[in-house]
Image (cartoon, rainbow, N blue to C red):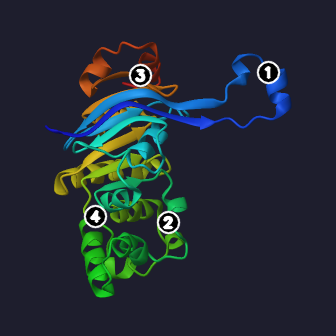
């Protein structure tokens, strides 16, 4: 598989805003002026694969996903997408590229406007990217809703987020990401807010969409069991750094870093009795 993304020495710092008294009475460690959310990481994503990015909350996973799409600006480093460095291209050109680079956020309820119907929410990216015909947008939205199981599409098209189940809301968010025919999706903890009964259905749908739409995923998760099910390779992130990376088979069979071992120890094992 050819490389879709190559990330080199990527760093993101956030400034620490401290008062004069904080600085006056803080020790040397407390005088830091910035926190390294992402600290000099390098990795690649192959076309057609699912790369898992796993770690606890605050490890830098979500920040990394947003940096890849330039929803956040990096402090330093390179993000090459099909051999083009996204960190230096003009913002207007980046906006155009986002048709091919999409994100699915963790909480579907907070990422959907309560004032937009399902049809409006899914079709809005088409409007942003120049599809002015309301009839064309409607036809494309209804066809996609049928493909991903939002049925009956004509009925749900007019519904609002508060009228849907959790699983339906997650499918709406996926449809909104897919409507522009992307090739890469950052899936940021896409099942974390879903009921247990819905999670397996969403994961299976994501597998199906991967094949049907010829997608590539960066799958962000804190759950290694989920990563093992969906991902081809898994990178372990800790305190802003990638501490280990390998195929799912290698990572589960021969973990090297103590943090990876701790995460694996936390994976629930079914009771044989």
- Relative to residue 166, is residue 36 depicted above or below? above
Q: Residue furthest left?
A: 1
Distance of label 4 from label 1 (alpha carbons) = 54 Å
| Residue at the disc numbered 4 | 148
Rendered-image quadrant of the C terminus: top left
Q: Secondary structure at mark 3?
A: helix
Residue at figure coordinates x 26%, y 70% from the top left: 144
Q: What number is the disc on residue 250?
A: none
| Residue at the disc numbered 2 | 112
Label 3: few (<14), some (14–19) or many (≥20) C-alpha neighbours in 10 Å: some
Image quadrant assignment for residue 100: bottom left
Q: Nearer the viewer, mark 4 or mark 2?
A: 2
Q: Are marks 3 and 2 in contact (CB under 8 Å)?
A: no
Q: Secondary structure at mark 4?
A: loop
| N-term mark: 3 or 2 | 2
Q: Nearer the viewer, mark 1 or mark 2?
A: 1
Q: Are marks 4 and 1 in contact (CB under 8 Å)?
A: no
Label 4: few (<14), some (14–19) or many (≥20) C-alpha neighbours in 10 Å: some
Q: Secondary structure at mark 1?
A: loop
- Residue 220 lies, in percent from the top left, at 40, 40
Distance of label 1 from label 2 (alpha carbons) = 42 Å
Q: Are marks 1 and 3 in contact (CB under 8 Å)?
A: no
């Amino acid at each position: 598989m050819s490389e879709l993304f190559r990330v080199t020495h990527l760093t993101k710092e956030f400034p620490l805003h401290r008062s004069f008294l904080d600085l006056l009475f803080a020790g040397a460690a407390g005088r830091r002026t910035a926190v390294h959310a992402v600290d000099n990481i390098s990795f690649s994503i192959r076309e057609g694969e699912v790369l898992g990015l796993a770690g606890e909350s605050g490890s830098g996973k979500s920040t990394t996903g947003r940096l890849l799409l330039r929803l956040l600006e990096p402090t330093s480093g390179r993000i090459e997408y099909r051999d083009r460095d996204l960190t230096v291209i003009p913002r207007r050109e980046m906006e155009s590229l986002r048709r091919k680079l999409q994100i699915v956020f963790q909480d579907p309820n907070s990422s959907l406007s309560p004032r937009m119907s399902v049809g409006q929410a899914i079709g809005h990216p088409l409007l942003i990217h120049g599809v002015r015909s309301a009839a064309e947008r409607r036809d494309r939205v209804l066809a996609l809703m049928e493909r991903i199981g939002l049925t009956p599409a004509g009925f749900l098209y007019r519904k609002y987020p508060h009228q849907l189940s959790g699983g339906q809301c997650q499918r709406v968010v996926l449809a909104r990401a897919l409507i522009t025919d992307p090739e890469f999706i950052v899936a940021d903890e896409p099942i974390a807010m879903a009921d247990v009964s819905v999670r397996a259905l969403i994961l299976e749908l994501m597998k199906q969409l991967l094949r049907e739409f010829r997608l590539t995923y960066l799958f962000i998760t804190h759950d290694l069991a989920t990563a093992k099910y969906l991902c081809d390779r898994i990178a372990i992130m800790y305190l802003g750094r990638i501490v280990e990376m390998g195929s799912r088979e290698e990572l589960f069979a021969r973990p090297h870093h103590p943090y990876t071992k701790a995460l694996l120890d936390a994976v629930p094992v079914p009771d044989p009795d």
